[in-house]
Image: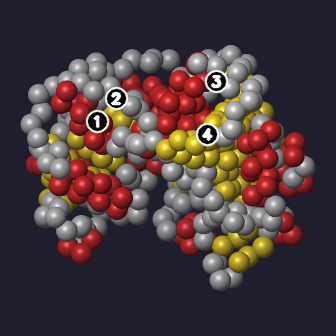
Amino acid sequence: MSTTEPMSTAEPMSSPVPIVLAGARGHGRWHLDNIRRLQDKGIVRLAGVCELTPLTPAEIPEGLGTPEQSADFGALLDTTGARIAVICTPIPTHTDLALIAARKGVHLLLEKPPAPSYAEFRRMADGVAEAGVVCQIGFQSLGSHAVPAIRELIDDGVIGEISGVGGAGAWARPEAYYRRAPWAGRRRLNGVDVIDGALTNPLAHAVATALALAGATRATDVTGIETELAHANAIESDDTSCVRVTTADGREIVVAATLCAEDPDDPYVIVHGDRGRITYWYKQDRVLLQRAGHGPEEFEYGRTDLLENLVEHLTDGTELLVPPAVTESFMRVVEAIRVAPDPVRVPDDAWRLLPDEERRVVPGIDGLVAAAADTLALYSELGAPWAFTTAHPKEVSP
């Protein structure tokens, strides 16, 4: 397995840096707004938008002008002179689009998950490295200043010996969420991997952040993965799932997620020590430190925007926060979910429909998600009757 990475050297690049955004609807709207923010600061300039159907003037935030539009990504990179491409397209297209940009010498901000399989991830990462361009993976939570602060607390032994890390994500999505695109809620589409599940897409940050806090970001840091995948919605992928990762140093990382929560709340990660714990609400950049002999302490942190970090890396050599290598272990989890048996269907008597919100709820799942993160146990080990048939252990060879 190659782990070759591009040289992290600054290059002369005048401001504002021309950018092409591929995929400007859906989550891509967030990128449009962020590019507008950075354009106002004089850092970047939106030079082009790649969409199958061009954006209407009303879909382009005020102040971004009239960027060139085309459905031909490669041609758009050429005509705009783009130096950075932001790729926010369906998961199966990530690798091919990233390699088109890389071969043209265009640097990348690639949305998570970076690929639907480990093989596609390696093809992307190795191709980008060979082209000598820089790639940032869009795990925004890893841009939080809380992450290095928590790592410092861990290294300083503030909560003692670390036994493991838990992650909890209790979110809700209406049934319409799975009708928003042909690939939504799919494991495969027309024979191509998609792997659009709770842990691999909407709550992927919980997995990546837990791995980062455990200091287990490389593929060789993972020695085993167990998955439990289920769905209450009428989809083929999972909307209620958990995973246990065993690391090379013997620690366990358990992340539990659902899109069928009764009372949706912000996801979080817990670092368990023998003298305390650290809880990190990664969407809020908020940290709670609890330890023996001390009262609870709360901290709030800032966050570095990943596109801004990419520009600064290219212009003055600032360290890149989320290169592909930092997501290797996350992609091992994606791969384990990809090769696992198809998710089991939660029985009809174990979920209910909320008509006013047009979404499905699994009663008791909020407590199960929290308990999994708290005890590092899987759903089946916590007594969820529908989970007993979902357990799927998988050993991972470094």
Sequence-wise, which precedes: disc 3 or disc 1? 3
Residue at 39%, 17% in the rendered image? 4
**Which callout, 1 or 4, points to the residue nearer the camera?**
4
Secondary structure beneath label 1: helix
CB under 8 Å between discs 3 and 1: no
Residue under label 1: 310
The label on residue 158 is: 3
CB under 8 Å between discs 1 and 2: yes
Amino acid type, mark 2 = Leu
The label on residue 140 is: none
* Real-space CA distance between mark 4 and mark 2, rounded to the nearest whole angstrom: 30 Å
Sequence-wise, which precedes: disc 3 or disc 2? 3
Residue at 87%, 70% in the rendered image? 349
Sequence-wise, which precedes: disc 1 or disc 2? 1
Residue at 90%, 54% in the rendered image? 385
Sequence-wise, which precedes: disc 3 or disc 4? 3
* Real-space CA distance between mark 3 and mark 2, rounded to the nearest whole angstrom: 28 Å
The label on residue 297 is: 4
Sequence-wise, which precedes: disc 1 or disc 4? 4
**Which callout, 3 or 4, points to the residue nearer the camera?**
4
Query: Residue 229 vs residue 152: left or right?
Result: right
Amino acid type, mark 4 = Glu
Residue at 23%, 67% in the rendered image? 60
Query: Where residue 354 sits in the image (x, y, percent)?
Result: 71, 78
Sequence-wise, which precedes: disc 4 or disc 2? 4
Amino acid type, mark 1 = Leu
